[in-house]
Image: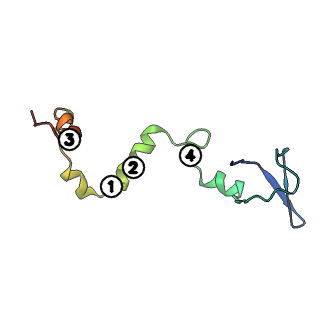
Amino acid sequence: MIINVKARYADGVLTPLEPLDLDEGKEVMVSIEDTQDAVNDAPPTGKGRESIPQMFERLRESVPPETWDDLSTDLAKNKKHYLYGHPKE
């Protein structure tokens, strides 16, 4: 089970800012993310999310330019060939 909860660190102790549904004495694994860093690193578009065009641009930029030259230009026409091995049209 994974629970995301905000907590405050003071005097060497992490204190959850909301109630936790855990048994007393239960050992848990804690991952820490500075919420200020998360805000600063978030994409600039509304509510901390990148837009679809921004996502496609980021993905396009992640592919080496020479790879685009090797892609098939008839994928829509011959999708059955590329998916299932049918003869090309």
Could you tell which of marks 3 and 2 lies nearer the N-terminus? 2
Q: Which image quarter: residue 11?
A: bottom right
Label 4 secondary element = loop
Q: Which is nearer the eye, 87 or 35?
A: 87
Residue 67: give x, y in percent of width and height. 24, 55
Residue drawn at x 10%, y 37% as measured from the top left: 87
Marked residue nearer the N-terminal end (3 or 1)? 1
Asked whether the beta carbons under mark 1 and mark 2 sit within 8 Å of each other, the answer is yes
Amino acid type at image mark 4: Pro
Residue to which mark 2 is pinned: 59
**Camera-nearest label, 3 or 1:** 3
Q: What residue type is labelled 3?
A: Tyr
Q: How crowded is mark 4: few (under 14 residues within 10 Å), some or many (20 or more)?
A: few
- Residue under circle 1? 63
Per the image, the residue denoted by label 3 is 82
The mark lying in front, picked from 4 and 2, is 2
Badge 2: how crowded within 10 Å, few (<14), some, or many (20+)?
few
Q: Distance between the residues labelled 4 and 2?
A: 17 Å
Mark 1 and mark 4 lie on one chain; the one further toward the N terminus is 4
Residue placed under numbered mark 4 in the picture: 44
